[in-house]
Amino acid sequence: MLPASLIDLSDFSSEEWQKIVSLALKIKEHPEAYFGRCEGKILATLFYEPSTRTQMSFQTAMLRLGGQTIGFDNPMNSSVAKGENLRDTIKIISGYADILVIRHPMEGAAKAAALNADCPVINAGDGGHLHPTQTLTDLVTLMQEKGRLDHLTIGLCGDLKNGRTVHSLIKTLAPFQNRFVLISTKDLCIPQYIRDILDANGSSYEEVFSLEEAISELDVLYMTRIQKERFASQEEYDAQKDVYVLDKEKLSHAKGSLRILHPLPRVDEITVDVDDDSRAVYFKQAVNGVYARMALILTLLSSEEKTPVPTGKEIKTATCRNTKCITHTEPYLPSCFQECGDMLICDYCEDRFLI
């Protein structure tokens, strides 16, 4: 049975999401064969944060499948502006739609939504936590460009602390005997829970500070922007921006077979003169997002038997320490945790702390 919703790619078995990747590539090859597959179905897009590619690619995906879309791209144009909580918004709109997509600034919001929805929920990004449909897009692109998802040396560069696309990609590719080169400043390195995932999978990885020194050994370079909206102040952001910039000079030291990915939007971390290099595939990657999301929508809507959203143990005396966790703005949510030795792991945002 497939999961009822997509909160994290780990909700699916590797075989299940590899089938979705294969379906996406089939759709890309023969899109006309899939038009009308969702006739009479409605997709709701609830975007509490700005989005271009993710929101429009979901809308395009549903329209190409013959369905329709509803939703908002500014919560201030909805009853959220009147103080409506997430539970009530989700409960109502999931009664209007057959499938629902949510992007939210609070970590764990997608899971909170899925617990209260009456239709499948897709996580389109929850704060700095996860972005699984971007990862599906990345996987489709890697399969198309490299022909495999394993035994690759993958460099991830930029804001690895707040980059939800980075977290999702590492979680998904860690079991596939890939080597990771994590390129960031000390202040923007990967969070502990991602490091724990790498260790648990026995993944080979190293943390470095120089893109110039690492680029020659990479099969894949995943560039990311510095996430300005995740910083507490302009001063903190200014101290980190422009540290990593990929340009023609740095690219001259890379393999001819390198592939450069970026979840976009780009700010200034890749110069425009790189765009014409055959190794730059980030615009193809963005287009692949439509086919990845078409495949995901078809998969979730076609499954009749679905497993419920998994939940941990409710511990009423415990509170998540992560101030960006959805439990701090939606206090009605049960305090659910996974127990791991002498640690508790928040069921929503995956933050962990000693008991």
Image: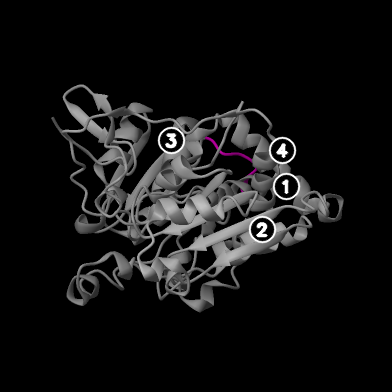
Extreme-left residue of the structure = 355
Q: Amino acid at mark 2?
A: Val
Marks 2/4: CA distance? 18 Å
Label 4: which residue?
302
- For label 3, count other residues whose C-alpha is less than 10 Å away and answer few (under 14), some (14-19) or many (20+): many
Residue 48 lies in quadrant: bottom left
Residue on which disc 2 sits: 290
How many marks overall?
A: 4
Foreground disc of the pair 2, 1: 2
Camera-nearest residue between 183 and 292: 292
Determine the secondary structure under disc 3.
Answer: helix
Left or right of 140? Residue 111 is left
Of callouts 2 and 3, the N-terminal one: 3
- Report, in whole angstroms, how far the alpha carbon at label 3 lies from the one at label 4: 29 Å
At 57% from the left and 57% from the top, the residue drawn is 256
Residue visible at 57% across and 52% down in the picture = 100
The answer for how far apart the CA atoms under marks 2 and 3 are is 25 Å
Query: Badge 4: how crowded within 10 Å, few (<14), some, or many (20+)?
Result: few
Q: CA separation, marks 2 and 1?
A: 11 Å
Magenta includes 148?
yes
Disc 1 marks which residue? 25
Crowd rating for badge 1 (residues with CA inside 10 Å; few <14, some 14–19, many 20+): many
Q: Is residue 65 left or right of residue 158?
A: right
